[in-house]
Image: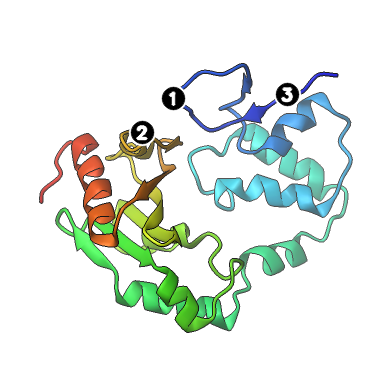
Amino acid sequence: SLSFLFYHHFISKPINRFDFNRCTGIFELFTEILDLRIYEIKIINLIDTGCFAYANTTAQTHAVAAALLRTGIDYQTVNKVFFRTKSRRRMQLEAAILNDCTFYDRDRVAVLSVPLSLMARIGASETDAEDLSALGPQIEGVDCAITMRELRPDVWKMSLRTGPRINATEACRLLGGGGHAAAAGCTVEAPWAEARERILAAVAQVAPDYQR
């Protein structure tokens, strides 16, 4: 039998793979090579475009979405359940993160921290903590949002969301990670203050006009 790895993120080390950077999500790829069988879960995959707002949205993305809509799927319920409903603990988590957010580079870089202690204090679950990296880019004036999520004591998952000024993949690659130009990640093993300084140093190295 044959096994295939379909991957649409940038990785620095080449492997034997099919690399489909042009596709916004795996489902968009498979609509081209498989018979289109419609399930509501498939429309969720297309929302990897940030509800069609990110730069990876293409005419083909909309064409696939249109094909899904023509089948009569309940897209309004899907959108409400998966993208416009938050638990109370999630709301408390967002409030705490934003309250402790710190800013750098003339307030263009924001660091949002999610330590294990905060998760425990609020009683937040893994579901409550999903996609917290989407919070920082919504702050006015911020074009580089760094979300630091503590996975284990002193092990931090860094998620970067950036604008055109900073290539997120180039910054994360300096710390062994990768992803897209506007969305990338890496893992840093260090106490919080040191981990923060390491990711900020990486951002400063790739930003053309970073000011400390």
The amino acid marked with disc number 1 is: Ser
Q: Decide which of tag 2 and tag 3 comes sooner along the chain.
A: 3
| Residue 94 can be seen, yes or no | no
Q: Decide which of tag 3 and tag 1 comes sooner along the chain.
A: 3
User: Mark 2 and 1 residues: CB-CB less than 8 Å, in contact?
Assistant: yes
> Residue 87, how many percent across, how many down?
60, 78
> Residue 171, how many percent across, how many down?
31, 38
Q: Secondary structure at mark 1?
A: loop
Where is residue 208, by image quadrant? top left
Task: Return the residue at label 2.
Answer: 173
Q: Nearer the viewer, residue 79 or 102?
A: 102
Identify the residue at image location x=19%, y=42%: 204
Badge 1 local density, few (<14 within 10 Å), some, or many (20+)?
few
Q: In whole angstroms, how far apart are the C-alphas of marks 2 and 1?
A: 8 Å
Task: Return the residue at label 1.
Answer: 12
The amino acid marked with disc number 3 is: Phe
The answer to whether 48 is drawn above or below residue 171 in the figure is: below
Q: In whole angstroms, how far apart are the C-alphas of marks 2 and 3?
A: 25 Å
